[in-house]
Image (spheres, rainbow, N blue to C red):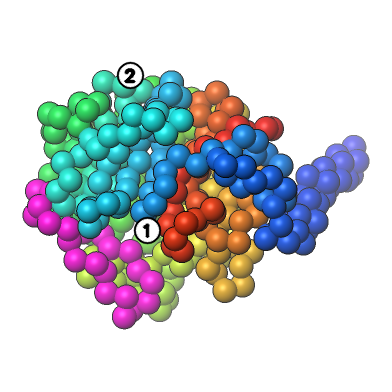
Amino acid sequence: MYTKCLFALLLFLLASCSNKDETSKIDQTQKTSQTEDGTIFEGEKYFKNIKQLTFGGQNAEAYFSHDGTELIFQSTRDSLECDAIFRMNIDGSNLRLISSGEGATTCSFIAPDNKSVIYASTFKGGTSCPPKPDMSQGYVWALYKSYDIYKADPDGSNIIPLTEEPGYDAEAVFSPQGDKILFTSVRTGDLELFIMNPDGSNIEQLTDYPGYDGGAFFSLDGKWIVWRASRPEGEALTDYQNLLKEGLIRPSHLEIYIMNLEDRKPIQLTHNDAANFGPYFHPDGKRIIFCSNMDDPKGRNFDLYMIDIETKCIERITYNSTFDGFPMFSHDGKKLVFCSNRDNNTKGETNVFICDWVD
């Protein structure tokens, strides 16, 4: 009985993982569909009716409202010198700035009841944009000490600080039930995940291991979280800790983890030693979509992938020769929003795209 069950499981794993080798041979430059709204590349079988929503600048981290009618995102555009927070309808209409336009902002999210928004900002530390990170140490992200998490009314008014600890506090999201906020903080001396009430009270630490833990999201039922994490050792740990003292992080090796909020034991899903980030649960709770450079030997091109939580099998979702990242499903699973360099008018632009998800 055991032998038959094991053989059946192996057949299932081979069948469910076999498409990765086949699809990896597809020419990434070959397009199967190109319309005025956007391009779908060969192999992107889950995409239909793609539409480009922004045109120009750097647009990233676009996330659905709970009812799926609006998006909130960060953008550096026009006269802005660093990211500000915008909202728009899912067809790109009714675009409006909702942050103050002062300092830098990041990681915005809409409350499930649509009565508030949250985002991180440096404006209390100065109204001008903070200095860019020093790239002489390689590709690094800046962790500005003046970043704190703020709550505001839907139009951006009535700004209230939720965190006021010294050091980096950011990457905050609401639970789908609206009862908790998940965020990343350096308050313990390391970058860890924390959870708190929507008013900033009752803060609890969720992770406690040397390395970066961040970019976390809830499952649709609010029982699980998914995030990106580094677990450096030896010289890599020393490098991480030295950079952290300078308010920097090198995001070249990040793996995807999940955790049940009841037992709070981290479970590592990916083991590819690549830069994996931007994970988000499919509404079925069985799969996670994320961004990775795992298929680019030079580590420069990022595409979207889906991992099955039970089998750990990974399927490639996008085949764009430039960047695709920051994916999020609408709560009914019918739409996917992501950010991409595809169809750029100017090299290096990143725009927001939305499409129907054909499962």
Q: Secondary structure at mark 1?
A: loop
- Whether 282 is drawn above or below 338: the answer is above
| Camera-side mark, 2 or 1 | 2
Who's the residue at 30% across and 51% down the image? 77
Instruction: Answer with the quarter of the image where residue 70 lies.
Output: top left
Q: In the image, is residue 132 part of the stretch drawn in magenta?
A: yes
Determine the secondary structure under disc 2.
Answer: loop
Q: Position of residue 148 (x, y in %)?
A: 18, 46
Which residue lies at the image location 47% right of the left edge and 56% below the top edge?
345
Q: Amino acid at mark 2?
A: Asp
Start and end of the magenta stretch?
A: 123-144
**Between residues 57 and 11, which one lies in front from this camera angle?**
57
Camera-side residue: 277 or 328? 328
Residue 170 is one of the magenta-drawn residues = no
Residue 113: image tag: 2
Q: Say which residue label 1 marks.
A: 212
Q: Using the image, tell me which numbered label, if any, was put on residue 175.
A: none
* Disc 2/disc 1 C-alpha distance (Å): 31 Å
Q: Is residue 276 above or below residue 91?
A: below
Q: Which residue is at a point 64% across and 64% down the rendered structure image?
A: 295
